[in-house]
Image: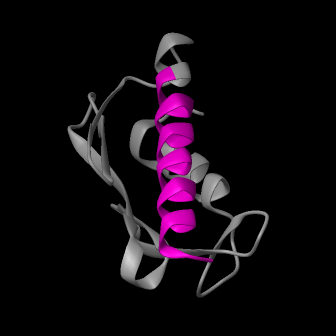
Amino acid sequence: MTESEFLDLADATLRKVEDAFDRAFEKDTLDVECRRSGNVLEIEFIGNASKLIVNSQAPMQEMWVAARSGGFHYKYDGQQWLNTRDGSELFATLSTVAKEQGGGSL
């Protein structure tokens, strides 16, 4: 994938993640506040002030997630973002993190 294709995909992925957390907030299943600056999306869980960071890493063509439970790297396999260590899917991990850190669901 070219750098331009990656940047478009990463931007669309960050929008999708932000939209998912915004919907959870609107449905009152998570109390979160999202802030995006360029390729970095910061999600704050209001109840405990913990943060989840999702960002793109163009040089490696990866999406990175930083959460209380650790840091995770994801590569696109042509259909979905998969963890480079255990093969888990990005949105499945985000759902788990939302439950662990925020006590709610996406």
Residue 104 makes an appearance in the image: no
Identify the residue shown where x is 59% and y is 88%: 85
Instruction: Describe residue 104's horizontal placement relative to residue 56 as left or right.
Output: right
Q: Where is residue 58 shown, x and y percent of the image?
A: 40, 74
Q: Where is the C terminus found, in terms of image quarters?
A: top right
Residue reaching furthest bottom? 85
- Of residues 77 and 29, the one drawn nearer to the viewer in this rendering: 77
Asked whether 94 falls inside the magenta stretch, the response is no
**Residue in the image at 47% along x and 47% along y:** 14
| Apparent side of residue 20 relative to residue 54 in the rendered image (left or right) | right
Q: Main secondary structure of the magenta part?
A: helix
**Which range is magenta?**
1-22
**Residue 89 shown left or right of residue 21 in the figure:** right
In the displayed structure, 105 sits above or below 29; it is below
Q: Is residue 92 visible?
A: yes
Q: Is residue 64 above or below residue 25?
A: below
For the image shown, how many numbered marks are present on the structure?
A: 0
Task: Tell me the colour scheme of the image.
Answer: one colour
Which image quarter: residue 93?
A: bottom right
Seen in the picture, residue 38 relative to 24 is either above or below; the reply is: below
Along the line of sight, the residue nearer the viewer: 53 or 39? 39
- Locate the N terminus by quadrant: bottom right
Residue furthest right as drawn = 79
Q: Position of residue 21 (x, y in %)?
A: 49, 31
**Residue drawn at point x = 67 percent, y = 55 percent:** 92
User: Horizontal and vertical percent for residue 78?
Assistant: 77, 70
Residue 102, x across and y down, in percent: 41, 37
Asked whether 3 or 60 is in front, the reply is 3
Residue at x 74% of width, y 75% of height: 77
